[in-house]
Amino acid sequence: MLLGVTGLSYCGESGPKKGDKVRLPEPRVSGNVSVEQALQQRRSCREFSTKPLDLEQVGRLLWSAQGITGDRGRRTTPSAGATYPLECYLVAGRVDSLKPGIYRYVPQEHSLVAVAAGDRRGALSVAASNQEFVARAPISIVIAADYGRTSMRYGDRGQRYVHIEVGHCAENIALECEALGLGTVCVGAFADDDVRSKLELTEDPVCIMPVGWKSE
Ligand SMILES: Cc1cc2nc3c(=O)[nH]c(=O)nc-3n(C[C@H](O)[C@H](O)[C@H](O)COP(=O)(O)O)c2cc1C
């Protein structure tokens, strides 16, 4: 079922059903913060207010991570041999007009597809060495990788390429956060198997980016 961006109930009152789709607002590509200002301002943020995010912000963040920007599926983030091993998952807790749950970003449609219902931020925080700010942030974006897509072409070197690509993707999210007045931090300390099972991922989690309004 494809659900639009108007109205309050995107995925039914009881939460998203696996496979439900949510179309995201078209990403705007203009703003008031220069790349240089975003670079100057970027600092890891671990203090988030409880204010929810909206779908416009969520859409722009995911677009910065993996959005389609060119022909033949070219994306915001470069990819070794255009093999595109990354999948971005949204762990949604407090987003206006979006039920809490796990969603996979589909770059080709600029949409979300529901993976599982329910607020998993607490479980993610526990899996991330009990880093409590992960539970407080309204959302996290989990960058996961299917290493096979890249190593099929590049052999052992593929793993290195995937990790370089995750770094690009994470920095894109960090700079987009600055452009939107939001905060984030790259979280690498977590138990891979726990994150994979708690979020029902099919790929390997490499990086967690909790995002929210910076706390005063
Ligand atoms: C690969 C990587 C993993 C990181 N893992 C964590 C983490 O698990 N928890 C955390 O609070 N910060 C984590 N950080 C953030 C660093 O602590 C932070 O970037 C560093 O202290 C420099 O501060 P700055 O980002 O404000 O410049 C990580 C950063 C990177 C690049």
Image: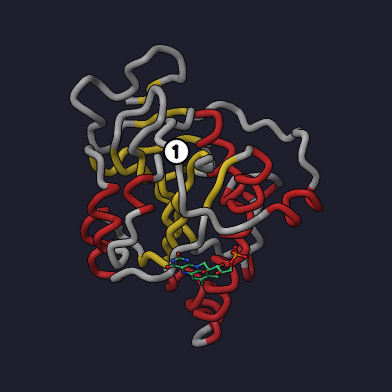
Badge 1, how many Cα within 10 Å: few under 14, some, many 20+? few
In the displayed structure, does residue 169 sit left or right of residue 122? Answer: right
Q: At 24% across and 42% down in the image, what residue appears? A: 116
In the displayed structure, does residue 76 sit left or right of residue 201? Answer: right
Q: At 35% across and 45% down in the image, what residue appears? A: 136
Task: Between residue 171 and residue 203, name the one nearer to us.
Answer: 171
Instruction: Point out residue 79 in the picture as x, y percentages from the top left corner.
Output: 62, 65
Task: Look at the picture and state if 58 lies above or below 124.
Answer: above
Instruction: Point out residue 129 in the picture as x, y percentages from the top left corner.
Output: 29, 67
Task: Look at the picture and state if 23 lies above or below 208.
Answer: above
Q: At 49% across and 60% down in the image, what residue appears? A: 86
Which image quarter holds the N terminus? top left
Coloration mode: secondary structure
Instruction: Point out residue 19 in the picture as x, y percentages from the top left corner.
Output: 29, 37
Q: Amino acid at mark 1?
A: Ser
Task: Between residue 188 and residue 151, name the one nearer to us.
Answer: 188
The part of the image, by quadrant, that contains residue 187 is bottom left
Q: Secondary structure at mark 1?
A: loop
What residue would you read off at disc 1?
49
Instruction: Point out residue 62 in the picture as x, y percentages from the top left corner.
Output: 53, 44
Task: Between residue 104 and residue 184, name the one nearer to us.
Answer: 184
Task: Look at the picture and state if 111 lies above or below 189.
Answer: above
